[in-house]
Image (spheres, grey):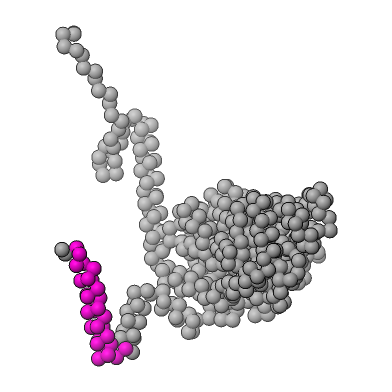
Amino acid sequence: MRRRNTKRDTERAVQRHAKRDTERHTKRGLARDTERHAKRDMKRTPHMRYISRMRRTTRMKIVFLLHNAYAVGGTVRTTLNLAAALADRHEVEVVSMARHRDDPQFAVDPRVRLVPLVDLRAGSADLADPARSQPSADFPTAEKRYKQYSRLTDLRVRAYLERCTADVVIGTRPGINVYLARFGPRRALRIAQEHLSHDAHRKKLRAVLARHYRALDAVVTMTEADAAVYRARMSLPGVRVTSVPNIVPAPATPPSDGTAKVIAAAGRLAPGKRFDLLIEAFAAVAAKEHDWELRIYGGGAERERLRNLIDELGLAGRARLMGARTPIEAEFAKASLVVSASDAESFGMTLVEAMRCGVPVISTDCPLGPAEIVTDGVDGRLVPVGDARALAEAMIELIQDFAWRRAMSLAALESARRYDPEPIVARYELLFGELLATRHQRSWLRLRVDAVGWARRRWRGVRRRLRTSTGARPAGPRGRIPAGPARPRARRRPPGLT
């Protein structure tokens, strides 16, 4: 009987408490209760005090460490975007490990200070420095850019970090993050940005990163899926592993009207981007839709092979390799579809840039970024990895259904607002506040885990030495002898046998 009345009793209790709360609010005043609850919540979540204090009074100094701020690349562009957005409220400095030209390729916000460490321009005194000809001793050898670093870079980075007065220092590639972990100022928050996915790094490099990242305050990936991989595969006690996507500001060009019979794609012409798969899929599209063309933007080692494939499939004049374009948004705005056929993506920058231009996107559902950017059937399409037929069918569906394509275009514009500067800056400021509030707790956690690990290693060493010297099983940590393998039981003899 009580079971049948449980739901009714619960509903009555809820109504009774709701009535009492209403009367209490009426008697004491809603404003007083709101203030009391706000104070209680502030006490329970101390990081909120740091965040509110930062937003009211604190102007922080934030430093970004870049490989080469004067070059062209996705990491350079996204770092400069974030630096400009943070400069609205903070003092921002971008430190470039190298400088090979007079002016940066991308525009640098005038409020952002640019500091090069090693000058590689012709006639520079750094080229004659003896340390320039010596290999780096601090940059990880398994890092792809290792040969571009020298002992001179090591010395300059270490000297800069020793005198650095920043509140936050953010590294932007694995080797630079190792510099930061080893030599970064202890008073500053030290944060590693990962612009490549965990699995994109070599196994040897991952082992180095797992050792050095333990000294950092946070590791920030571009996608939540990649953050989950880092949490699962790297033991980082006291290190906050989270994801914050890149800023992709709204382009200056007007959005696409969706009438141009153009399919666009962009990226480095490398095997992993699978432009060969895209060209094969477009061959099926071209057989049905004779007025549409494919434009591929970018440069790279695969250019000649892709050109030969276009000729073999009879797509000359219909599929074109356009070369690199900066900014790419102006070209995306001339298209009605943007397609990505990659086997893997750490973020999917071109997808967001296309959506910013009001262009629906079609992407392979590859690890790790597209599924967090594209909502299938709403602002784009997701198809299986490596499936040229599914890619072609998705393109044909959107080509033939203008109304659906137009609806996706409007949805893409709305969805891309997630990558505005304001929400991304807010997420970083929230992260800074949480890291400041939990700094001591995270330090104790790291010390406790390290102490336990040290004790276990010492105990294993003691057991190994005892086994070697006496051949006996040593006692356990609390004086007990660990149970060994069970001895085989003696076989019972049948009665009457001796």
Determine if residue 378 is in view: yes
Camera-side residue: 485 or 13? Answer: 13
Q: Quadrant of the N terminus?
A: bottom left
Residue 220 located within the stretch drawn in magenta:
no
Q: Is residue 436 above or below residue 497?
A: below
In the image, what residue occupies the spot 70% across and 63% down?
399
Q: Quadrant of the C terminus?
A: top left
Name the dominant secondary structure of the magenta segment: helix
Q: Is residue 422 above or below residue 154?
A: below
Residue 275 x %, y %: 72, 54
In the picture, residue 344 is in which quadrant? bottom right
Horizontal side of 5 relative to 130 (left or right) equals: left
Residue 21 located within the stretch drawn in magenta:
yes
Residue 4 x %, y %: 20, 64
In the image, what residue occupies the spot 68% across and 55% down?
392
Q: Is residue 142 above or below residue 379?
A: above
Horizontal side of 467 relative to 369 (left or right) equals: left
In the image, what residue occupies the spot 67% across and 78% down?
109
Horizontal side of 317 relative to 497 (left or right) equals: right
Determine if residue 297 is in view: no
Camera-side residue: 175 or 200? Answer: 200
Q: How many marks?
A: 0
In the picture, residue 363 is in which quadrant? bottom right
Camera-side residue: 73 or 346? Answer: 346
* Magenta-highlighted residues: 3-30
Residue 211 x %, y %: 50, 53
Residue 424 x %, y %: 55, 73
In the picture, residue 101 is in which quadrant? bottom right
In the image, what residue occupies the spot 62% across and 74% down?
410
